Image (cartoon, helix red, strand yellow):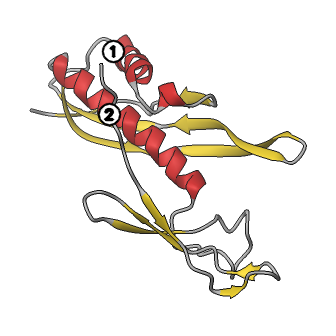
């Protein structure tokens, strides 16, 4: 089976005193559809004003990629099981920790999905947990990282058909 390839273009140019470590970490991410995303280091890693708080930082993007992949896997599995999901929201977070002298890593990502299901009655209580576990197993991004990923779903919400 041939692999699938994904690209991103990252562009940065010096703005400030590079040699003195007083330069902007602001840069642009460009994706194949033409989308440009302002990016920067996290202000928790590189203090303001040398980072851009309103831009996406790599740590946030990492958490978002895991959450997004999990959601798309979940939605597909729910559809295949004939469940109708009307909305999905995740307030995910990641934990950056020291893993060795001079090394930091995202060591844990917690997904807290809130699913709204179109149904007249609540399905078997194990349905939600089982589907999240299956979604985690098939998520491409989760299968690509070595940090702990916890899934703590919010209670299922129902809306009438």
Residue where numbered disc 2 is placed? 4
The N terminus - image quarter: top left
**Quick check: 142 left or right of 106?**
left
- Please name the residue shown 42% across and 37% down the image: 113
**Quick check: 105 left or right of 146?**
right
Q: Where is residue 8? Give x, y as percent.
A: 41, 55
Residue where numbered disc 1 is placed? 127
**Quick check: 160 left or right of 144?**
left
- Rendered image quadrant of residue 40: bottom right
Q: Are marks 1 and 2 in contact (CB under 8 Å)?
A: no
Q: Where is residue 45? Give x, y as percent.
A: 73, 63
- Which one is nearer the viewer's eye here, 28 or 118? 28
- 105 lies above or below 83: below
- Please name the residue shown 71% across and 46% down the image: 96
- Graded by Cα atoms within 10 Å as few (under 14), some (14 to 19) or many (20 or more), the crowding at tag 2 reads few
The C terminus - image quarter: top left
Farthest left residue in view: 161
Give whichever of discs 1 and 2 has the lower sequence position.
2
- Which one is nearer the viewer's eye here, 142 or 75? 142
Q: Where is residue 60? Give x, y as percent.
A: 55, 54
Q: Is residue 152 visible?
A: no
- Please name the residue shown 70% across and 78% down the image: 48
- 23 lies above or below 133: below
- 37 lies above or below 152: below
């Amino acid at each position: 089976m041939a692999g699938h390839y994904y690209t991103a273009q990252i562009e940065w140019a010096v703005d400030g005193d590079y040699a003195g470590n007083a330069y902007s970490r602001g840069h642009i991410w460009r994706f194949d559809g033409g989308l440009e995303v302002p990016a920067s280091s996290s202000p928790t890693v590189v203090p303001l004003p040398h980072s851009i708080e309103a831009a996406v930082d790599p740590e946030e993007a990492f958490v978002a990629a895991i959450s997004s992949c999990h959601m798309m896997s979940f939605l597909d599995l729910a559809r295949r099981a004939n469940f109708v999901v009307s909305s999905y929201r995740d307030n995910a977070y990641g934990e950056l920790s020291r893993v060795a002298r001079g090394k930091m890593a995202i060591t844990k990502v917690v997904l807290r999905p809130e699913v709204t299901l179109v149904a007249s009655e609540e399905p078997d209580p194990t349905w939600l947990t089982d589907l999240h576990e299956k979604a985690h197993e098939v998520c491409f991004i989760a299968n690509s990282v070595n940090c702990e990923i916890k899934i703590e779903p919010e209670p299922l919400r129902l809306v009438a058909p």
